[in-house]
Image (cartoon, helix red, strand yellow):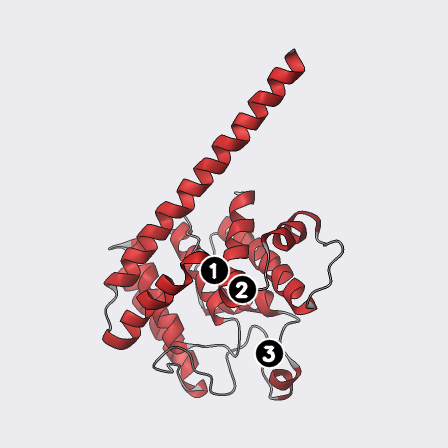
Amino acid sequence: MHAHRIAFAYHSGKIENKNVTYHDTREIFEHDSVTAYTGDLRILFEIRGAKDAYELFLTAFGASRPLDESLIQELHGCLVRNTYDERRWKSGERPGEYKKHDYRAGRKAVGALPEDVPGEMRKLLVELQELENRDVLAAAAYFHARFENIHPFADGNGRARRLAMNYFLVLHNHPPVIIHQEDRRSYYDALEAWDMEQDLKPFCDFLKQQTEKTWEKQLRRTEKSNSCSEQGVKRVLR
């Protein structure tokens, strides 16, 4: 699972920031520092926030916390801590709080008005409870798509919804899924089908593909690690 959380943080961050690297992500997750770094410090804060948010994720899961507004806001606060720019800060936006101003996303420029966000989020979580006992992956897909439509935060919505969706999945005994950065275009196309036509099937199909891809990669890493360990043992025994 250690490799999984690094991979998840890398791909989720890379989807929205092309300058995020796997090397820097692994260094921060494993050593809480990087060496010889000359890039934008914001990237390091984003990765460090991803690490803090995943630790909260694990703690919350261990305590069987439900996926509610409070947890979503806490996850968001961890993810974007120290990354809100001066313009957002001066306008009253804060990590872990719903947006104070209007921000839009997607081809249709979707996004609830700030005053409507709390009500829309509560409605979404009630709908999620009604769907969760049917098809967990479909319920997760709906949560993710509607979260994007609401666009509840001033920044960090993508990373927050991907992490919150995974929390919902593991709460319901479904393996977490990495949305791979190289599949970014397919990801956005699948979400656009919901934005434009309220058609959730393309996104459900996309999540199924990403689930298979996630765990095929994990199995290959495990097999490679086991093979390396076996070779090491053989060298020692010689």
Secondary structure under badge 1?
helix
Residue 226 vertical position relative to residue 8 in the rendered view, above or below: above
* Drawn side of residue 174 relative to residue 156, left or right: left
Residue 238 vertical position relative to residue 90 in the rendered view, above or below: above
Q: Position of residue 9 (x, y in %)?
A: 54, 56
Residue at (59, 74) in percent of width and height:
95
Say which amino acid is labelled 3.
Answer: Arg
Q: Which residue is mark 3?
A: 94
Mark sitting earlier along the chain (3/2): 2
Q: Position of residue 208 (x, y in %)?
A: 31, 52
Residue 75: mark in rendering:
2
Residue at (55, 65) in percent of width and height:
18
Q: In 3D space, how far apart are the residues under numbered discs 3 and 2 (Cα atoms)? A: 13 Å
* Drawn side of residue 85 relative to residue 164, left or right: right
Badge 2 vs badge 1, beta-carbon distance below 8 Å: yes
From the viewer's side, name the closer residue of 187 and 176. Answer: 187
> Residue 186 falls in which quadrant of the image?
bottom left
From the viewer's side, name the closer residue of 79 and 220. Answer: 220
Secondary structure under badge 3?
loop
Q: Is residue 138 visible?
A: no
Say which amino acid is labelled 2.
Answer: Leu
Say which amino acid is labelled 1.
Answer: Leu
Spot the residue most to the right.
36
Spot the residue most to the top.
238
Badge 3 vs badge 2, beta-carbon distance below 8 Å: no
Q: Which residue is mark 1?
A: 163
